Image (tube, rainbow, N blue to C red):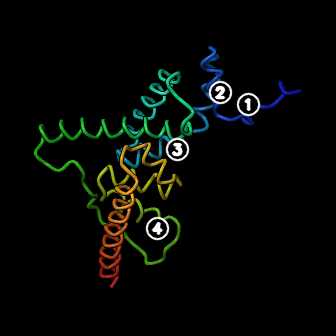
Amino acid sequence: MRQTIKMDQKDDRYYINKVLEGDVQAFSYLVDKYKDMVFTLAVRILKNRENAEEVAQDAFLKVYQNLGKFRSKSKFSTWLYRIVYNTAISKVRVKQKTTMSIEDQKFFEIGDEKQNVSISFDIENNKMILQRLLNKLDESDRALITLYYLDGCKISEISEITGFNRSNIKVKLHRTRKKMQEELHRILKSEIVEII
């Protein structure tokens, strides 16, 4: 009767073992389970959907190629996030070098188009403001905020993913929250002035 258990009812280790035994199709379970989280982290770091899709594909390819190196000391998702994080950060560094050498301008730009803003804080407005706040952060801080608040990772998991020590992560999260609060006050103040 154990053979009739559906694929989605087994844990990650089961599918990892199946892939390592030669069942390539079992990898699709892992991709389906984590693709949204992988893409979200990549897009938060890169701020570009096309680049994030490329990083997500590259990360899954690296995972597949290195699956035999995964040791169950940490969760599979933590190991996967570390690969995504490193792949995205590498892409940002390459992009920064080429952008700065070709054009002498800042890599990160904040959209300057004026928007009609209402004071009501509905879900869409909150998402828009959150995205504006995240866009103001550098890729490392954006990744920390995404991992901790949006993906619910623990400090120990973030440490494994990023390579930062735990106390450094706590300090960075604290400073980043403070930056975001200051920027939120500035955004709200300017929106109120526009309305008046």
- Please state which of residues 196 and 150 is positioned toward the viewer in this rendering: 150
**Mark pair 4, 3: CA separation:** 22 Å
**Which circle marks residue 138 in the picture?**
none
Q: Badge 4 is on which residue?
A: 125
**Mark pair 2, 3: CA separation:** 18 Å
Question: The residue under label 4 is which amino acid type?
Answer: Asn
Which element carries disc 3, helix, strand or loop? helix
**Mark pair 4, 1: CA separation:** 39 Å
Tell me if label 4 and label 2 are in contact, CB under 8 Å. Answer: no
Tell me if label 1 and label 2 are in contact, CB under 8 Å. Answer: yes
Q: Which residue is at a point 29% across and 75% down the rendered structure image?
A: 186
Number of residues whose C-alpha sits closer than 10 Å to that of mark 3, classed few (under 14), some (14–19) or many (20 or more):
some
Q: Badge 2 is on which residue?
A: 15
Question: The residue under label 3 is which amino acid type?
Answer: Met
Which element carries disc 1, helix, strand or loop? helix
Q: Which residue is at a point 48% across and 50% down the rendered structure image?
A: 156
Which element carries disc 2, helix, strand or loop? helix
